[in-house]
Each structure stands twice: as structure tokens, then as C-alpha cells.
Image: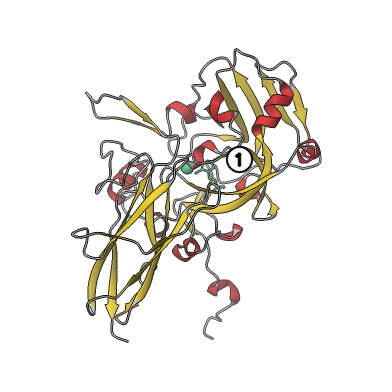
Amino acid sequence: MAAQITQTTLKPQIIPTNAGLRTFAAPPTALQEDIVPNDLFYIRNHWTDCPEIDQATYRMAVDGQVSTPLSLSYEDLKQLPQKRFQVTFECCGNSPVPDYWSKALRISTVMEGIKGHGIMGNAEWAGVSLRDVLEKAGVKDSAVEVMFEGADHGPDETVGDPPEVTYERSLPIAKAMHPDTLLAYEMNGEPLPLNHGFPLRLLVSGWYGMNSVKWLVGIHVLDHEFKGFYMTDRYITTNEPGSEVPYTYYTKMKVKSIITNPAPGEIVPASGYTLAGAAWSGEDQITKVEISTDAGATWSLVDTVRPRSDYSWNRWEHQWNPPGPGKYTLMCRATNDQGDTQPMEFPNKWAGRGYGNNMVFPHPVEVKDR
Ligand SMILES: Nc1nc2c(c(=O)[nH]1)N[C@H]1C(S)=C(S)[C@@H](COP(=O)(O)O)O[C@H]1N2
Ligand SMILES: [Mo]
């Protein structure tokens, strides 16, 4: 008997990108809407199993350089003033250059999910301002950084060394005290899903994803810089010997844009088509999105760049009437209010892990008579 097509096989799903079911990308069509639904939002976990925390007994510790250490329950957090807004974020390993990525992961074939730009998303988040919690505890003048402790730990995912490490990241005190740095308990109107950090995650608006610690159990105010494994051995890149800056730290997301319509493999009708996509730039504003339909030889401004909602991406659209059937290479390029624009090539080739790729991406399409 032929296999039955069920609702499940028809529904788009997140795509695994590595062994161990730790990273899943959003399918390309999930990036076509303003909001990525929770079940299609990318997942990036350092361990296969995620911690299962009981909401009833959950406590979050706030300690270190504070006048009153706190132990907050889920209910305590819910009592604080609520903030709700959209935030777009991407993993700093999104849009990897396949060559560099396969070298870093020591894999010979690049898995489907790793191609493209699916290790990102936009959602509406609700929670409380981290600042409100820090002010409740009373941050001392000696505070330099705040360290965030996740409940997940184990051997490092790729090399198993260190054999025991906890997911911990820190922020400079200024970003921690920014009113839009959230402790989020809701995602798109639902309690935070298990894979996205239930019951509480940090959400660092405008910064790369690894800063937004999930399954948050501790907020530790420090009088020094935190030098944990995920600060010094991951999510930084060593630059070429002799470079002015020896290491690059990835904090706020660089200016970037992608084409979402047509999706990869979608045939464009020769009669005309509305190209669409997204552009974002961390804390900065997008001022311009350009489009090329001839592989970067000529550029024009896109027809429409829609305003963003708080920290969301800007959606853009452009009517294209192709000269005729055939193969074309489309490209888009965004510029921000600091004057930064996307480079034509992957900016830090030296870096083995290929983080922070914001190059102008070629988007091949086929136009056919219909
Ligand atoms: N506790 C914890 N927080 C974490 C991670 C993790 O593995 N453990 N992964 C980080 C990384 S690298 C990214 S890109 C984002 C992904 O968030 P998401 O899975 O909700 O999309 O969470 C960050 N926070
Ligand atoms: Mo990430």
C-alpha cells in the first residue's frame, strides 16, 4: 500500500542541521511572515536534552554585587510590570559559508538545514525588564558585568572537553540595565516553549542569539569580567595574525538582509513577481535596502521598506518584471543609520567557525513562461 500523505507530512517543520538534534533551522517559508510561529522558530541547544523545570518550585537567584540578594518564584516575576514587544534575533552562526562550516564541524557534506538563513526568527515576547529585577536587588557601584546562568550543562558538544560546562554568558552592566533587556516568560502569546527556555529566558534585544540565555536560574552581578567557556572559547573569533583587533566579540547583530520570496526552488513567472525579504541591524535602524537582479552589476532601491516594530526586522518588497525566461542571480543589500553596509564577501575568512556572516548573498532563481 502506498504511504498515506498525512497532515504531519504536509506541514512545514523545523530542519535538523547537525547530529545530536541540537540545532534546527526554520524552513525558508517560515521566514516569509512578520512573525515566525513557535513550532517553526529555530532551536539552538548545546545539549540534546533540555532541562525540564517545574514552574511551581522554580526559583531564580539574583546575587553577587547587590545589596539584597533575591530568590524569585515564577509568580514573583509575573507580579512585576509586564513589557511586550517584537524582537528578531539570529544565531551568530546563521548563514554559514558552507566551506568554513564543514571545516569547523569536520563534516564532509553540508546538511540541508545549514544552507540558507533559517537559524533566525522574529517573535513577540513578553516578560519583565531585567532592570526592574536588578533595581529590586540594588546593584552596587562595584558592578561591572552581569552573568546569566542556564540550568543546562554537560560535556562540550563538539569535542567533549571540558567534560562538564554550564551554559553561562555575561553582559556589560550598561546593556543589562537597558530597559529593553528582557526576562521573557512568553513567546507569541504562549508560555515560553520548553525548547526556547521554559520557564524564563534572557532576551538581549538587538544582540546575537547566544546572549539570550534560556532556562535562566541565576543572575550574578560581578565586579569583574566573566571569562567562562562560552565567552572565551566560543562566539569569538581569532583574527588573522597581525590584525589590529586580535579577537572579534559578537555582540549586536550586524547589518544584514535576505530575500525570502521567492523561496529556494520556487519558479518565478515571466509575467512578473513581487520579491520580498527582511532586513535588520541589531540596535541600529535600517536606512536603505537595495536590490540587484543581475548578480550585483547594477542596483536600485527596493519599492517599499516597511517600518519595524520595536526590535523586529524590517520587511521589504519589490516588484520585478524579468526581461524574459532564464536563470538570474538576485541579491539584496541593506545599509544602517551608522553608514554600515553589507560586504560583498564573507568578512572574516580567517575565522574557522564562520560567525557573523552578513555578506550580500547570491539568490539564484529560475524564471519561466506560464
Ligand atoms: N541555557 C542556554 N541558553 C542558550 C543556549 C543554550 O544552549 N543553553 N543557546 C544559545 C544560542 S547559541 C542561541 S542562538 C539562542 C537560540 O535560541 P532559540 O533556541 O530559542 O532560538 O539561545 C541561546 N541561549
Ligand atoms: Mo547561537
Q: Which residue is mark 1?
A: 214
Task: Examine the rendered structure and indicate whether residue 77 appears above or below residue 333.
Answer: above
At 72% from the left edge and 15% from the top edge, which residue is drawn?
A: 67
Tell me if mark 1 has few (under 14), some (14-19) or many (20+) residues whose alpha carbon lies within 10 angstroms of its own: many
x and y, in percent, of residue 8 in the image: 58, 72
Q: Choose between 39 and 54: the one closer to the eye.
A: 39
x and y, in percent, of residue 227 in the image: 49, 21
Ligand 1 within 8 angstroms of badge 1 C-beta: yes
Kindly give the residue lying farthest to the left in the view shown.
297
Question: Can I make out residue 266 in this image?
Answer: no
x and y, in percent, of residue 166 in the image: 57, 31
Q: Choose between 288 and 48: the one closer to the eye.
A: 288
- The answer to whether 229 appears left or right of 68 in the picture is left
Kind of residue at badge 1: Lys
Task: Examine the rendered structure and indicate whether residue 200 appears above or below residue 176.
Answer: below
Question: Can I make out residue 19 in this image?
Answer: yes
Rendered-image quadrant of the N terminus: bottom right
- The answer to whether 166 appears left or right of 235 in the picture is right
At 53% from the left edge and 15% from the top edge, which residue is drawn?
A: 224
x and y, in percent, of residue 186 in the image: 68, 49
Please, what secondary structure does the residue beneath circle 1 have?
Answer: loop
- The answer to whether 247 appears left or right of 8 in the picture is left
Q: Quadrant of residue 340?
A: top left
Kindly give the residue lying farthest to the top in the view shown.
142
